[in-house]
Amino acid sequence: MEYNFRSIEKKWQQTWKESGVYKVSNESSKPKFYVLDMFPYPSGAGLHVGHPLGYIASDIFARFKRLKGYNVLHPMGYDAFGLPAEQYAIDHGVHPAVSTEANIANFRQQLDNIGFCFDWDREVRTCEPSYYKWTQWIFLELFHAYFDHSDQKAKPISFLEKEFEKFGSSSVNGKRSPVTFTAQEWNAYDEKTRMDILMNFRLAYCGYGEVNWCEALGTVLANDEVVNGVSERGGHPVVKKKLRQWYLRITEYADRLLEGLERIDFSDAMKEMQSNWIGKSSGAEIQFDIETPAGDKLPLVVYTTRPDTIFGVDFMVVAPELDLVEKITTADQKKKVDEYLTYVKSRSERERMAEKKITGVFTGAYAINPFDGRKIPVWASEYVLAGYGTGAIMAVPCGDQRDFLFAKHFEIPITNIIGEHYNGEEANPTKEAKLENSGFLNGMAMREALEKVIGEVEKKGIGRRKVNFKMRDAAFSRQRYWGEPFPIVWQDGTAYPLNQKELPLILPKVEKYGPGPEGEGPLANIPEWILIPNPSPQVEKGAARVPKYGIKSPVQYELAKELRKGHTDAEKKLWELLRDSKLGTKFRRQHPIDAYIVDFVSLQERLIIEVDGGYHNNSEQTEYDNQRTKILNEIGFDVIRFTNEEVLSDPYKIKNRIKESISRIKDTSPLPSGERGQGVRESSTMPGYAGSSWYFLRYMDPHNENEFCSRKASDYWGQVDLYIGGTEHAVGHLLYSRMWTKVLYDLGHIGHDEPYKKLVNQGMIQGSSRFVYRVRGTHQFVSAGLKDQYETDTLHVDVNMVDGLELNIDAFRKWRNGEYKDAELIGEDGSISSPHTANGEGHAVRYLCGAEVEKMSKSKFNTVNPDDLVQRYGADTFRMYEMFLGPVEISKPWDTKGIEGVHRFLKKFWRLFATEEKGWIVNEQAPTDAELKVLHKTIRKIGDDTERFSFNTAVSAFMIATNELADLNCHKKAILEPLVILLTPYAPHICEEIWSQMGNSGTVLDATFPVFEEKYVKESTKDYPVAINGKTRTEMTLALDASPQEVEALVLANEVVQKWLEGKAPKKVIFVKGKMVNVVV
RNA sequence: CCGGAUGUGGUGAAAUUGGUAGACACGUCAGACUUAGGAUCUGAUGCCGCAAGGUGUGGGGGUUCGAGUCCCUCCAUCCGGACCA
């Protein structure tokens, strides 16, 4: 019996699938454990060896926890909305749904090859209506909520409305209101005015703001999608533009997002990144007065974290974008200021960042220092950002480097308030100095002065203590097609939410993916969708999701329509009823919804009425009806079915039931009745992070049609116990999903307010690129060692054609359809391989490639496909090798070579159980002490290492155990069976096979993790290292219970020790029990 | 510029609390079996040295009986944030 991994893996993957061993129940007496991977974006490129690293780690941990007796949730899904699919659609004309579907199928195939224990019944796809229905639902929850500052939590906005009704804007919660109003005024306001005011409070709100506009992509990007002034994807230039956008009021959660970091197990680096992004700073807002050219006074409010340095203010700087600049500019400075403003406008964000020139202009105005009355010149400069603080600063050149450089550049005199701490060469931002030249603060320590000044400022009524955040509200709309449509209808400039009954708002099919008019998204190009009432979703005909019954082509579709023209009596009767009775809504007849033609539908109320003929009683038809109802429900339609008899026998009963359904819908409708049908839909779609902000909740209850996730399910599974994914989502996804969780918690939908208990960041697997060197203008390629002797071009070659550094010359000549078939290769020793001469004789030409570590990418030809490795060595080998590479959280380059070692290990492990000659060789003999020791040592090591995610050392522990047991010639069931359980999380296929060969039934995952017993590994002696002056010189075997005196005597008597002592008496002997002995001479 | 992480053989890496540096592999070398070996097995393998021994965890300094591990400082690489007042 050989280790035939191919048939073993195929067999067990099949068995697992058929028996559903990875199905997880929400009901269990076991403790729960939730292991989550960051779900992938299904890109067209498929998986490379870097992707599965985290999945393998989580898979091992999930299996490990299951063996340890937990009910483990380990789901997987797809983050399927997003730009690349849309870009692909623009380039190739393939609908994103189609390419996404194909990519998912490919991903799934690749994932299945590796043998993961995902519960695929819980798969989610963010682009499915049954999923994004709830993304839209949560959006509405955000829309209908505001942040209550006194309670520091989100509440339904109706609470706020009640407060306004009673107290007007003077209520605590009204502070943010842009206008003040009394309760009477509020009650007298019309709908639109109220809605406008409430928009300033909603957690999902619409506003005009400077956004990152990317012309090339035709969309707005979030701050974290812009890198160095260009788009993260594609590297297109990004400019600031004022547009109407949706935002999430994440800034309200800044404090709680910071506080929550203390309660979760993230790496320090990750926490640091998040808190840097939030960027909390505390200080004060201080008002200075400015005398305008006209002679009156204008307030200039600045934000500073260092109010203690107020006597060191030598100038003020205002952001050029501020209107104030024009107001305060004096006549003689006007020309210069205008020139400067023009210059600033001409500069892109990118230029500003790239070249850090010191620029600015004096406005001619002076501000008055409120403490000593000093006149301070007011400048405008682009180094002050309009968006942060108040857009104006008090400049203290002796304490701030930017202010210092500015002062030097424009020759503004510098006041030193920190004495010897300032050297005149550079600013010193110390907080430790005693203040000088600082009026009433003289001699005071800076920290003390800071509080003192804030106190004085507040007393004078010219400012207040203030906390500021770098974080901005998150832009939440994209002028794009492939995303969740907003459940919003605009009416006369007011945004009205859809009724939750109307969800999901299905993404319609478009013909063109180009941008719409005036910076709107592609959806704006579909008037029949944009203008409500909604003329039924334009789902591709033939895309029916009940495979057997759908209409499969446009021809069939027309045919079906034709066939249905013969009405039954019942249909006629009902049609009269629906037309005549004052139901308040328009019904359509024989109208296509999704891929079906329904009997009657009110598009406005999303209500479908079906009349079933006698043939509906047969079972096949019933099944069809049920499936169809389910799908129509999924896309947000209610379906009522009547039989012919019901309609004909009691039409009034029927009518009442329909009325009832409609009024139920009406009751919860926020849209003023009668005004419907005049609005336009929001044409933006939600950004990529919308769907991923809550998917971890959906996994808990993926098929729930009535809720995003039942409270029972979320209470049972609670937080994600272990979340594994890359660092690239540090500030995006992780912050947004934390915010959503907090909102859902505040509103009482879930019982925990941090989504992830522990986060492990997997490192990136880099590519190891290979190069060949072509002699310029020829077909000659020279080996790496010779490249400096020629003028060469460096070309990437496919790393899969290179063994170590040696190029497979034949493969190279065939590469890329024979592009290099004429290549003449000069080997390291100067020998030449020409395509026209046989080189089988003598020695083969050794051509060595150059090598470099780069990001793994198709264009660099350094990607390695896991499928190839699984095919060659098996999934178990592949899994273990990925783990053996090094710690999960470290980035490292991929090198396929070492995989042989792991493969050899599995073969050797197999030979403990069976060999080719003798077949199955496991016996029932009693184990020896030595064997038990190996086993228990390994149980402890594997348990500890797995628990602390040290998978690489665990793999090596398996190797050690296998080597030792092979040396002991051990084939005993009592030792090997527990070992198989230990190895199961790492190499599940081979373990299942052995487990069943050993005569067990069922899956090895239902076995119990072996228990470590101290008694088997206890030693009575230890080989102590004996050091002289800290250097190990010899080793002595001593009893573990020997007393220090005994040890000292034995050690000093040792001949090696004697030799080093050279007759001298030792100064000291240090003995650490169980560790070492050190003799100090 | 700021913040974080990481620097250990030819390579990937171990060393969990300050206690035998280099486990486990890859590679390389030697050998066995073999018609053959890119299969399998055995042995060697940080560097210098025939050896005794010396030396060695990015460089320099420190604490300690003892430092890869702690402290100071400098250097390099990677990642993140960058005019945030």
Image (cartoon, coloured by chain):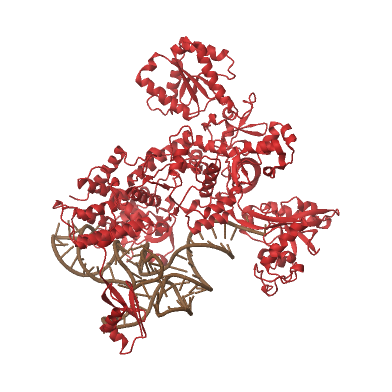
Chain colours: A red, B brown
- Measured along the vertical axis of the image, is residue A212 above or below residue A520? below
Q: How many marks?
A: 0
Among the 4 quarters of the image, the one containing residue A21:
top left
| Residue A117: x %, y % from top left | 34, 45
Q: Residue at x 41, y 26 (%)?
A: A627
| Residue A954: x %, y % from top left | 32, 58
Residue A893 makes an appearance in the image: yes
Taking the view exactly as shown, the residue that stands out farthest to the right is A295
- Measured along the vertical axis of the image, is residue A870 above or below residue A141? below
In the rendered view, does A464 fall on the left or right side of A503?
right
| Residue A988: x %, y % from top left | 29, 48
Among the 4 quarters of the image, the one containing residue A780:
bottom left
> A173 and A61: which one is in front?
A173
Q: Residue at x 49, y 11 (%)?
A: A650
In the rendered view, does A393 fall on the left or right side of A713?
right
Residue A897 makes an appearance in the image: no
Q: Residue at x 56, y 14 (%)?
A: A579
